[in-house]
């Protein structure tokens, strides 16, 4: 009981000092922290506790690829491909190309024609998704004896497309969010078809949602002239006007050919906010060609299938730059510029979950959590003191180190401290002393049964240890399951709880034992003080 | 210094005798809990039911719940719940899923913002769409089921089967009563409530394991004692610790309820109930189960073999006692030798 190897003692002391050092920077006020950082060498940036969005304020938005939109886009592309193949092979079909929910169907009456197009159609598989070699086919091509050919997108094909859409979206979203100038946004894939965006400390969550929710697919198409073939015309909504406007289906220039877009003001006319853009070489050429051939016609600027404006082409624009005007506010022009610079999302994304906490509420929650922690810890400390006297002091010292260990653990793991996480810490304060209580009560019992002080102390620690491990394992299991299944704030709770359970073994058992050994060595008690 | 003792010393409560009361009582409560769950249901929060919660703070400093309610009803968002809490400037709006999928939920928030935005700041907006809420229900249920399986497995390895069954029945009992508590109080049930339930499961087992550990130990020490008496003795022995720990955890939880704020209040209140139930069940439900399941003291030998390792630990205590005492000359030098040798003697001298 009394003997402690020096290295064990030193290890505990070192751990405690290290824990305090790790935690200390987090406890400083922001200005003091900056000062500390400026004095330390640049390779040593002291890590601090990461506060969850519920504490520092911010937005947590989960976006999901719109399956219906994704499928309809795929079906549309498929239709174009099938039409192209039929045309290339000069195959006649009876009726048009029909679309089903998941694909297209055509009736090819001539068996020889069927034999000609089927292999070509099967080859679509490869262009549909190059990366899916060897996996389940993304496309099903079926031909019935009566001449009906069905090409359908399989579940595997949809999953593959939505996974790719998520991958590309993450990049686009990152560029968009970065443009907002917030610090440390986190953009992650979640499952096959979701993107989780977490942006801390956002003053205006509306702008975030605004720029996340837009696909930002920009197209330049000519407004249809009267008398054009109706099958080549599409009626689209207008942003600033009632009613639809017919535009050609053919896209002349696409948003992906933009190299830059900046908000500005219209110099010549009203001085209203506009977005100035520049094309890359391909875009500039296409734009120059269209505007040269179609002087006098209306040229529609279409964003997400809505016509922003349709200015008349006065002179050929060959310089590769242009201007979008559409009765914008300054903010709208800003957002549009951000969206155009970041590029279009490959698919429509919907917000399926949103949790936004304003900075004021976050600070309130921090204050509430702190108050609860101080009061909770204070009550437990006093209670231990009046129940166990000097042993209570040891337990309380261990409790202090225990809390330092939890925070150090949070800092080192880079884990996020949430409000439920604080609740978890307060709860472990109540539970950490359980180990001390188990030991102390056991010591009392052994002493009452007639053992010497030293023998009671030793038996108390040894016997209680098995129970402490057993009872903490069950709690740890609960925390672990909570961690793997929980999300966000609840995860924070699980981490605090699990850390609390792990550190209690070190603090309540080893550390208390050491303190009692030292105390016994110097005090030489004749009576057990509890 | 006179120290505080909440638990009386050397109690001899005949806990096992209460099993004829506690079992029907708990069975009745569990049935009521199930009935409440089925007929009254839970107040599922937006995490599980889907929907929107918006926390508002009045710019004028005083939230008008009545006006908000009228405004909210005018927006036609279905049942809209307006609540004031804490600060007089604060209020929450809650409404269910809007028909029309994920896009409709966001549109609803926009309408609320348009209607109240001039007078109120939106401090917190939480929108959970239909698919996400379904997934949260699944993962929550999975979590509770998995934790029970995991714990059962652990207990099965660690203890005799009677212990494991007793512990699981006690845990199920606590789970049912906690669910009943959520139903009767209509406390909002959300993902932090799942956290509360799993923590209660953990705590309940913690309590149970402490009692069972002692029962197992005493089973080996006092082989001649009838089971009921031996169980009583074990519970009485750990009673001071049980009371101490329940009190410290309660102190921490009361601090959370009083100061922790709105978001975690339902968690803390549920935990307080859970600690209470878990303490009760470890004494009155789990331990008597051992008698019903026919745990006989003759099994003690087998148990002793199964837990060879602990015997070694005991032996280590004994060995170290001798060493440790040798260099220290204290007045208690002549204390009895290690427990193992004197266990028979102590059984007579100790209150049983």
Image (tube, coloured by chain):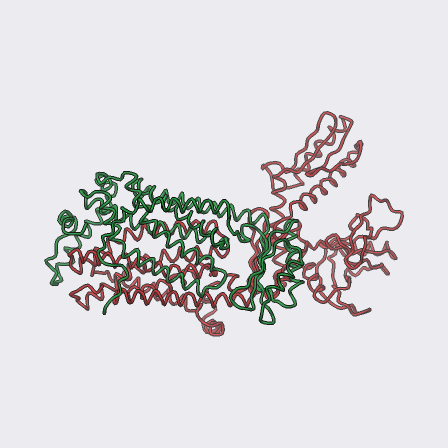
Chain colours: A red, B green
Q: Quadrant of the C terminus of chain A?
A: bottom left
Q: Is residue A210 visible?
A: no
Residue that sits furthest to the left in the current view: B334
> Exactly how many numbered labels are in the figure?
0
Asked which quadrant contains residue A124, the reply is: top right
Please state if A328 lies on the left or on the right of A358 as rendered: right
Residue A269 locus on image (x, y percent): 82, 69
**Of the pair A477 and A86, the residue shown nearer to us:** A477
- Nearest the camera: A353 or A383? A383
Left or right: residue B274 compared with residue B121: left
Residue A493 versus residue A142 in the image, above or below: below
Q: Where's residue A283, x and y in %?
A: 75, 55
In the picture provided, is A29 more to the left or to the right than B288? right
Q: Nearer the viewer, residue A70 or A474?
A: A474
Residue B343, above or below A140: below
Q: Nearer the viewer, residue A70 or B94?
A: B94
What residue do we see at 74% from left, 61% from top? A278
* Whole-percent x, y for residue A177 in the image: 61, 60
Answer yes or no: is residue A478 visible: yes
Q: Is residue A162 above or below residue A205?
A: above
In the displayed image of the protein, which residue is found farthest to the right? A227
The N terminus of chain A - image quarter: bottom left
Residue B68 in the image, given as x and y percentages of width and height:
62, 63
Which residue is painted at 60% across and 58% down in the image? A174
């Amino acid at each position: 009981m009394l003997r402690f190897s020096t290295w064990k003692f030193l290890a505990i002391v070192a751990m405690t000092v290290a824990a305090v050092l790790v935690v200390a920077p987090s406890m400083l006020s922001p200005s003091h922290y900056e000062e500390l950082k400026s004095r330390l060498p640049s390779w040593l940036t002291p890590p601090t506790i990461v506060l969850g969005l519920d504490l520092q304020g911010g937005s947590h938005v989960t976006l999901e690829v719109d399956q219906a939109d994704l499928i309809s886009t795929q079906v549309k592309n498929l239709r174009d491909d099938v039409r192209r193949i039929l045309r290339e092979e000069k195959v006649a079909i009876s009726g048009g190309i029909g679309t089903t929910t998941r694909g297209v169907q055509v009736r090819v009456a001539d068996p020889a024609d069927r034999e000609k197009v089927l292999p070509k159609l099967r080859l679509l598989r490869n262009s549909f998704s190059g990366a899916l070699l060897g996996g389940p086919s993304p496309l099903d091509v079926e031909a019935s004896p009566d001449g009906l050919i069905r090409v359908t997108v399989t579940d595997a094909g949809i999953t593959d497309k939505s996974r790719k859409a998520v991958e590309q979206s993450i990049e686009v979203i990152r560029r968009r969010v970065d443009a907002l100038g917030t610090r440390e946004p986190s953009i992650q894939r979640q499952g096959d078809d979701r993107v989780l965006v977490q942006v801390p400390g956002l003053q205006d969550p509306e702008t975030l949602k605004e720029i996340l929710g837009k696909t930002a697919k920009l197209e330049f198409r000519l407004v249809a002239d009267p008398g054009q073939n109706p099958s080549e015309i599409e009626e689209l909504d207008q942003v600033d006007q009632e009613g639809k406007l017919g535009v050609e289906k053919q896209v002349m220039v696409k948003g992906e050919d933009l190299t830059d877009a900046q908000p500005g003001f219209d110099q010549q006319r009203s001085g209203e906010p506009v977005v100035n853009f520049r094309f890359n070489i391909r875009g500039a050429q296409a734009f120059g060609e269209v505007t040269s051939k179609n002087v006098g016609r209306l040229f529609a600027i279409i964003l997400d299938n809505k016509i922003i404006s349709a200015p008349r082409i006065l002179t050929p624009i060959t310089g590769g730059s242009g201007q979008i005007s559409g009765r914008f506010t300054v903010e709208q022009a800003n957002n549009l510029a951000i969206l155009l610079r970041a590029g279009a999302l490959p698919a429509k994304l919907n917000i399926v979950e949103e949790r936004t906490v304003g900075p004021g509420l976050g600070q309130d929650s921090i204050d509430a959590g702190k108050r609860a922690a101080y009061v909770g810890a204070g009550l437990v400390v006093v209670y231990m003191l009046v129940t166990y006297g000097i042993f209570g002091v040891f337990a309380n010292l261990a409790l202090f180190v225990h809390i330092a260990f939890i925070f150090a653990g949070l800092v080192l793991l880079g884990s996020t401290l949430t409000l439920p996480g604080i609740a978890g810490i307060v709860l472990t304060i109540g539970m950490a002393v359980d180990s001390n209580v188990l030991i102390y009560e056991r010591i009392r019992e052994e002493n009452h049964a007639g053992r010497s002080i030293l023998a009671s102390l030793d038996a108390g620690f040894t016997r209680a240890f098995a129970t402490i491990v057993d009872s903490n394992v069950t709690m740890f299991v609960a925390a672990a399951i909570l961690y793997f299944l929980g999300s966000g704030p609840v995860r924070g709770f699980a981490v605090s709880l699990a850390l609390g359970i792990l550190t209690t073994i070190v603090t309540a058992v080893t550390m208390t034992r050491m303190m009692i050994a030292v105390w016994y060595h110097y005090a030489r008690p004749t009576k057990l003080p509890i | 210094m006179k120290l505080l003792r909440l638990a009386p010393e050397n109690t001899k409560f005949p806990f096992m005798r209460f099993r004829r009361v506690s079992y029907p009582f708990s069975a009745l409560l569990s049935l009521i809990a199930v009935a409440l769950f089925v007929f009254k249901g839970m107040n599922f929060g937006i995490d599980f039911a889907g929907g929107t919660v918006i926390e508002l703070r009045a710019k004028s400093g005083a939230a008008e719940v009545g006006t908000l309610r009228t405004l909210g009803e005018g927006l036609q968002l279905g049942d809209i719940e307006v609540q004031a809490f804490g600060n007089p400037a604060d209020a929450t709006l809650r409404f269910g899923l809007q028909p029309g999928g994920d896009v409709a939920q966001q549109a609803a928030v926009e309408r609320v913002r348009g209607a109240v935005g001039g007078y109120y700041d939106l401090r917190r907006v939480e929108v959970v769409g239909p698919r996400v809420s379904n997934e949260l229900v699944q993962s929550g249920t999975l979590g509770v089921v998995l934790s029970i399986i995991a714990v059962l497995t652990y207990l099965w390895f660690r203890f005799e089967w009677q212990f494991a069954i007793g512990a699981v029945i006690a845990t199920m009992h606590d789970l049912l009563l906690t669910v009943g508590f959520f139903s009767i109080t209509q406390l909002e049930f959300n993902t932090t409530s799942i956290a509360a339930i799993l923590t209660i499961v953990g705590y309940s087992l913690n309590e149970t394991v402490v009692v069972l550990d002692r029962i197992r130990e005493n089973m080996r020490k006092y082989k001649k004692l009838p089971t009921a008496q031996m169980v009583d003795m074990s519970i009485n022995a750990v009673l001071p610790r049980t009371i101490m720990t329940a009190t410290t955890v309660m102190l921490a939880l009361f601090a959370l309820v009083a100061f922790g704020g709105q978001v975690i209040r339902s968690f803390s209140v549920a935990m307080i109930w859970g600690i209470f139930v878990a303490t009760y069940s470890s004494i009155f439900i789990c331990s008597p189960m051992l008698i019903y399941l026919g745990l006989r003291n003759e099994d003690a030998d087998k148990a002793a073999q199964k837990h060879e390792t602990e015997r070694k630990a005991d032996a280590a205590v004994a060995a170290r006692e001798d060493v440790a005492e040798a260099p220290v000359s204290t007045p208690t030098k002549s204390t009895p030798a290690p427990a193992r040798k004197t266990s028979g003697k102590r059984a007579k001298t100790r209150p049983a």
